[in-house]
Amino acid sequence: MVSREHKRAALHEKLQLLRSITNSHAVNKTTIIVDASKYIEELKQKVERLNQDISAAQTSNDQNPLPMVTVETLEKGFLINVFSEKNCPGLLVSLLEAFEELGLNILEARVSCTDSFRLQAVGGENEEQSESINPQVVKQAVLQAIKNWSEGTDQQE
């Protein structure tokens, strides 16, 4: 007899837990289970919508991915790398303008713009500047130049 009461109490506790998780106001077992079933269906629909949103976001990123940027500090200046898997007409000009605005002299650069875009540049700070440039500032300026370039290309299409 104790076992049966124990099972009944455990079942009641689990139903109350299910009721609280599903925000059900039902009192009897059947209605709690029906509410839980509806709740599960709602969750499935939310998951499906989120998966569709993720797919749409990945598709748009695949069609127009922004270049990757790294900036490393060297003894006197920075090593700046910009890479994109696709050709980026006009991006080099935007980046050089951003370097000029920062007062960064390009001491050496290697650029490839055939099927992909790759820039590897060594930039030194302009000796006339009183304050040294933070590598994070360089990276942000490069990212902003890429963003401006990207928005300009989107408008042309």
Image (cartoon, rainbow, N blue to C red):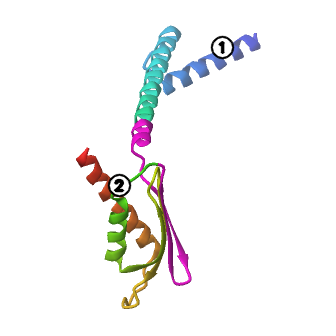
Could you tell me how far apart the alpha carbons at marks 1 and 2 are, in whole angstroms?
A: 72 Å
The answer to which image quadrant residue 95 occupies is bottom left
42 versus 109 height, above or below = above
Residue 83, given in percent of the width and then of the height, sits at 48, 57
* Residue, disc 1: 8
Residue 139, given in percent of the width and then of the height, sits at 43, 67
Question: Element under label 2?
Answer: loop
70 versus 3 height, above or below = below
* Residue, disc 2: 89
Q: Give the range drawn in magenta.
A: 57-85
| Along the viewing direction, whichever of 43 and 61 lies nearer the viewer | 61
Instruction: Indicate the amino acid at tag 1.
Output: Arg
Q: Is residue 65 magenta?
A: yes
99 versus 149 height, above or below = below
| Along the viewing direction, whichever of 47 and 26 lies nearer the viewer | 47
Question: Element under label 1?
Answer: helix
Which quadrant holds the C terminus? top left
Q: Is residue 133 magenta?
A: no
Residue ID at (39%, 44%): 64
Q: Nearer the viewer, mark 1 or mark 2?
A: 2
Instruction: Indicate the amino acid at tag 2.
Output: Pro
Residue ID at (63%, 16%): 11
- How crowded pointer 1 is (Cα within 10 Å; few <14, some 14-19, many 20+) is rated as few
